[in-house]
Image (cartoon, rainbow, N blue to C red):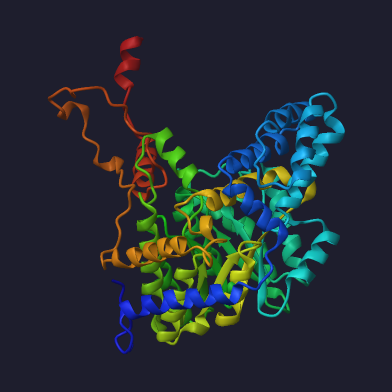
Amino acid sequence: MLSTAADSPASPDALAAEAVATVRRWLAESADVVPDRSAERLAGVLRDPRGLDFTIGFVDRVVRPEDLRVAGRNLEKLSRAIPAFLPWYMRVAIQLGGGFAPLIPWPIVPIARRVLRGMVSHLILDASSRQLDHSLRALRRSGIRLNLNLLGEAVLGDDEADRRLAGTRELLERDDVDYVSIKVSSVSSQLSMWSFDETVAQVVRRLTPLYELAAASVTTKFINLDMEEFRDLDLTVEVFRRILEQPKLKDLEAGIVIQAYLPDSFRAMQGLTAWASQRRAQGGAGIKVRVVKGANLAMERVDATVHGWPLATWGTKRDTDTNYKRILDWSLLPARTDAVRIGVAGHNLFDIAWAWLLAKQRSVETRVEFEMLLGMATGQADAVRRDVGGLLLYTPVVHRGEFDSAISYLIRRLEENASSENFMSGVFELATDAGIFDREAQRFLASLEGHSDVVPVSHRVQDRRLLVPIAAVDTAPRAFANEPDTDPSIAANREWGRQILSRVATSTLGDNVVVAAR
């Protein structure tokens, strides 16, 4: 079980029981809140056995294609399997539209795309100035803050990197925006882990003006450095530290994300805390760490399979949940929260209740901020906000003409809502279905029982410095096994590569071959 402070009157078991009771109270308080119509409709579609395939197919095959004729043909195919939960008028419209779309896609496909945008409008904001003005005014109310993230696909060139960085700067310059998120892969193209030091320096150069803007602002401006893939972990942490180590940014508080589904995240959290404590001791500002579970599992699996590497993430959802609590349990102590504020990010009410009770028990509740996603389970979010005193909503924004760049974000959210392994799959039945409540409560308790004090070991331990020369191998392998690619996200392998490069200038390898060929 997880530990509690030495002077705490409540045992871990009692804290867990109180967390479950708190969730029951939150659900009762949220029962009278009228759910957002778009959110309810989308949830209903995803409960349908064909709903996820239909919705992802619509997003990927009707919204994404640039050619309207291609989108029209795809719409016709999708219209043959419409989820029953959709209102009759929407089903009829999709059937009629699908029938005519291959013949006259020009008027029909744009209408179909607008319908989808309407269904997900509670999840993503339109970034156009006038629409964003209206949306921000409507969302800002007592106790609600917004963390804006300009969505986009992977940056492949300098022009796109410049545009994304400029777009985030425009958001931060707005008087009604005080919090933005950005990730290293969105501001610099073709990041190379082999050139780690050079890449860090390049990203720091590009991001520093954004942080200078925040530091010079009359009103408080906050920048959160987001993280997406395992390979970005070392790079993101190093960029974050280098930026804030600049004397001109000594007094700026900024944030970074840690993903609990990576075993490496706990050690990263320890390193960031030690560094932040030293920064505070030298008179600098603290930092904030946003603790998330991680939402890029599909890409991590693809990356591992293609390169022949072990999966970087935990193998089970329970292990991820345990590590999430391990990080919070370790972090929520007065000696650590003095330098590091904690963002508890997620929608699992049991985790939120447990973290809130733990923070109050240890008298660090003022150093904790609770964070959720825009448009997800708004009734429950209101109940949580009233209890914890505030809420930060992660708020994706996208320009209307670039809605296709929001596809990857949307698909992750759709999969979360549809997968029975995720808390969000039963979020609308949690208050009315005792079976779903018990399922989630038992998962919560099981994740607490799985904790140990041992620091998790990375799944990626490849070290090319330990290679055995072929001449030293005196037996043939039993069967052929392809050698995995070298993983440059591992520091040991980057050092191995630099050692090779350092020998190139004076190497005599191959001289004898050249001489023999003359």
Spot occupied by residue 55 in the image (x, y as percentages of width and height): 64, 42
Relative to 333, say whether 189 is above or below.
Answer: above
**Residue reaching furthest left?**
474
Q: Which quadrant: the C terminus?
A: top left
Residue closest to the eye, 496 or 429: 429
Spot occupied by residue 355 in the image (x, y as percentages of width and height): 44, 75
The residue shown at (58%, 55%) is 183
Residue closest to the eye, 503 or 153: 153
Quarter holding residue 28: bottom right
Q: Which quadrant: the N terminus?
A: bottom left
Spot occupied by residue 161 in the image (x, y as percentages of width and height): 67, 47
Q: Is residue 368 left or right of residue 450?
A: right
Residue closest to the eye, 470 or 425: 425
Relative to 385, say whether 297 is above or below.
Answer: above
The residue shown at (67%, 48%) is 406
**Residue reaching furthest top?**
518
Regarding residue 106, the answer to whether it shows in the image is yes
